[in-house]
Image (tube, coloured by chain):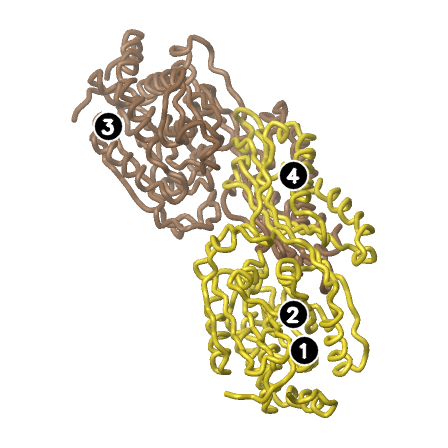
Chain colours: A yellow, B brown
Amino acid sequence: MPTLTDDLKTRILQAVDQGYAAQTELLAQLVRIPSQRGEEARAQDFMAAQYARRGYDVDRWRIDVDAIRGMPGFSPVAVSYDDAWNVVGVHRSRTQKGRSLILNGHIDVVPIGPRSQWSRDPYDPAIVDGWMYGRGAGDMKSGLVACMAALDALRGLGLQPAADVFLQSVVEEECTGNGALACLQRGYRADAAFIPEPLLPMLMRAQVGPMWFQVQVEGDPQHASAAFSGAGANAIHKAIFLIQAMDELETRWNGRKHEHTHFCNHPHPIRFNLGKIAGGDWPSSVPAWCTFDMRVAVYPGQSLEAARAEIEAFVAEAAARDPFLAQHPPKVIYHGFMAEGYELKDADEVEGVLRASHERVFGEPLREHATSAATDARFYGLYADTPAIVYGPECRMPHGYDEAVNLESVRKVTQTIALFIADWCGLEAYAA
Amino acid sequence: MPTLTDDLKTRILQAVDQGYAAQTELLAQLVRIPSQRGEEARAQDFMAAQYARRGYDVDRWRIDVDAIRGMPGFSPVAVSYDDAWNVVGVHRSRTQKGRSLILNGHIDVVPIGPRSQWSRDPYDPAIVDGWMYGRGAGDMKSGLVACMAALDALRGLGLQPAADVFLQSVVEEECTGNGALACLQRGYRADAAFIPEPLLPMLMRAQVGPMWFQVQVEGDPQHASAAFSGAGANAIHKAIFLIQAMDELETRWNGRKHEHTHFCNHPHPIRFNLGKIAGGDWPSSVPAWCTFDMRVAVYPGQSLEAARAEIEAFVAEAAARDPFLAQHPPKVIYHGFMAEGYELKDADEVEGVLRASHERVFGEPLREHATSAATDARFYGLYADTPAIVYGPECRMPHGYDEAVNLESVRKVTQTIALFIADWCGLEAYAA
C-alpha cells in the first residue's frame, strides 16, 4: 500500500490540475442535459455511461416508492417516479485495506423560472471570468463530476482507493431526498459519506430539516360584480390573510435558535419561503379556491411530528380569526420535504482527514458552518450511522437566474476530495 | 294582422304554460352540455339543431378575430377561437308589418370551480323546490331557451312575428363580448334587442363596463434557505403588496359614483375582483414570478383609455414605494373584457312595450335598476344604435356553486317575452 507522502500528495494535486480541462469539459456536457424533476433520466444515462467507461460496476434502478415508504426519512410524494432513476458506480478494492466511502451527489436541478431573465441559455454553459454558468453548474453537477475527476487523478498516477468507493448520482435531492434514501434501501453502506454540495469549501457542521406543506383555502365563489347574491368570499384574499399570519410563526421558530448550539449565532436559520401560489379560475368569478406552498425548516433534533402539529394549530388559530375561514377551515397537506435536521458529531476521524486535506490544498485551516439549507447528508448520518461530510465549491445564485460555479473553487475542492480519498481509503495499485 | 286583444294575450300566456314542461326539459338538455370557454361547440350544435327543427334559417359561423379586431367594443383575445362558433336562427316575416327584433343569449358558462363543493353534478340538472340547479341553468341557458319557447307558444296559436326575429346564441359573453360583436360584424341589425340575462324581471337601466387586466410581477429567485447569496425578492410577496394597494384605487373609483346618475345610489358599483393568481415554480426557490388577474369596471360614458392609464399609473406609483419593484416595474397587460359601460336611453317605445307586457304577467309595475354586472346589451346600444333590453329570470349563485334558476320566474319571463314579441313585432299567421 503506497504511503501518502507529501510528495505523493503533491503529485495527486498535480494530477487533478492535469485533468482539469477534461473535467471542466465533462461538467459542461452534463450541464447541457436538463435534469429538472421528472426529466433526469437522460442525465442519469450520461452518468451511468461515464461510470461504465471508467470500469466501475454500474447499478441503475428506478426508485420504488413502496420499498422506501416505511423507512425513516421518507418524504411524501405527490408525483410519479416512473422516470426517477438512481445510478451508482462501484469501485471494488482488491486489497480492502482502507475505509470505504460513499461519494454522493444529486443530478436533479430546480426549475429555471422565466427563461427571459437569464443572460444566456441556462443549459448552454459558458465560462466567463472563471465562472461556469448554467442551471445545475453549481448545484450540484460540479460536485458529481468532481468526485469522478478525483478518482481519475489517482488513476492517472496508477493508483486507486484501497477500499470500496460508491459513486452515487441520485435524484430527488431538491424536493424529498428519496433518491438518497433509496440508496440506503438498496443496501449501500460505507465508513463515511462525502457530499460536495456547493456550500463553500467549509465543513458543514449542521443543517436544518426542510419541510414543505401546502395550505388549501376555500372561497365562496360568486359573480365578481356582487350584482347577484352578494360578494362571496375571495379564496385568494383569505389565503393572503393566512400567508401574512405565517410571519408570526417564522419569528417564533427563529426565536428558538438559542436552544440550538450550532444555530444560535445564525442570523435567520429558519427561512419560511412562500414558494408557490395558485388560485381562481376566472377573473369575473370570486375565486373558489387558492393554494399556497411553503418551505419551512426544523432544527436538528426537533420532532417533525411536533412541527407539523404546531403548523396545523397555527393555521387553525389564524383561520379562527376570520369569520369565513372559521367556518371553512383551511387544510394543510404535505408533499415533498419532510426532513429532519442533521448535525455532524462523533466524527473526529473523518473530520481530521478532511481538515488535513483541506489545509494541504488551501494553505489555511478548515472553517466550519451551520446552514439554513439542507443536503442528503442527513440520511447517512441519521439513519445509517455514517458520518457524512458536506464540503464543496462556491456557487452563485443556486436556484436563481444565472447560476454559476467558481471553477477555481471546483479545482481546489477536487484536489481536497482526491487527497481525502487517498487518506481515508488508502491507495492500492490500479488494476483494470 | 291579428290584433293583440286582451283575450289573445291571455291565450299567449296560456300557450306558454302549456309548453312549459317541454321548455323545462329542453333547458335541462342544454344544461347537460358543458359549455365552458373553448368547449361551446357541442352546445351550439344543439342550439343550431333546435333552430333548424323549428324551421328557422340557421347561420353558424366561427368567429374570425381579424374581422372584428378593428371594431369598437372589441376586447383583446388571449385564447384560440378555433372552436368559437356563433349560431343565429332567423325567422323571416312574410308581411314585414312590425318591428324587427334580436333575441340574444350567450351559450358560454363560467368554470365550475372545485367539483367537490357542488351538492350535485353541475351538469346534471335537478329540480328542487322549484329551482333548477346546474352551471348555466340561470346564466343564461334559461334565457336562451325562453326565447325559443316564447316563439313556440305563438306558433302553438297558429301565429308568428310579423317582423324578422333573430335568435342569437353567442359565445364569449363571459370574457369579452366578442361573440355579440361578431353578430354585428356579420350584419345582424334589428329595431330592438332583448337579452334575458338572469338579472331579475326588471328593466336594466344601466350597466358598468368590465375590464380585465393582469399584473405581471418579477422576483429575484434564489435558494429558499437564503444560505447562499441572500434572500432574493419574493415575487408572490411583491404581488401581494400590489394587490393590497389596489384597494385604494377601488375606493377612489367607487367614490366617483356620485357623478353617475344611475349609480349614485348603488352601494358599490365598481367591484374590483382579484380573480386569479399564479406564481412560483418550486417551494424551495424564492419565486421568480407572480401574475394576478383583476376584474374592474368603468361607468357608462367613462373612457376606457383613461381607465387603463389610471390603472397603469396607479400600479407604477404603488411599485415605486417598494425598492425592488421600483427597479423591476410590474407590467400591466390586457386580455379579456375591455368593455364600455352602457345606459338604456331614448328608448321609450321599446320600454313601453316591455312595461305593458311585464304588468300583464306580473300584475305590478316594472321596476328598473342599474347593475354592477355587464351584458352584451352594450354592443347593440353603443355600436348599432339599437335599444337593448335586459330583463330575465331570477338566478341564485351565478358563477358560484349550486347555481340555480327559479323556474317560476323563468315561466313568467317567458310569458313577458312572448307578449313583448307579439306587441313589438306584431303577429301574422304561421306558415311553415
Badge 4: chain ID: A
Q: Which residue is mark 3?
A: B93
Identify the residue under disc 1.
A424
Pointer 3: residues within 10 angstroms few (<14), some, or many (20+)? Answer: many
Percent position of residue B232, x then y: 70, 59
Q: What x and y, as percent, mark residue B425?
A: 31, 23
Q: Nearer the viewer, mark 1 or mark 4?
A: 1
The one nearer the camera, A399 or B184, is A399
Asked whether, in this view, residue A286 is left or right of residue B327, the answer is left
Q: Is residue B312 above or below residue A171?
A: above
Q: Could you tell me how far apart the alpha carbons at marks 1 and 4 are, in whole angstroms?
A: 45 Å
Q: Secondary structure at mark 1?
A: helix
Q: Nearer the viewer, residue B250 or B190?
A: B250
In this view, the mark in front (3 or 1): 1
Q: Earlier in the sequence, mark 1 or mark 2?
A: 2
The image's mark for residue A192 is: 2
Residue B216 visible in the displayed image: no
Q: Relative to residue A245, is residue B389 depicted above or below?
A: above
Q: Are marks 1 and 2 in contact (CB under 8 Å)?
A: yes
Please give the name of the residue rendered at 52% of the width and 51% of the height, measured from the top-left corner. Answer: A69
Q: Which mark is residue A312?
A: 4
The Cα–Cα distance between marks 2 and 4, rounded to whole angstroms, is 37 Å
**Quarter of image, res A237:** top right
Q: Residue at x 65, y 49 (%)?
A: A274
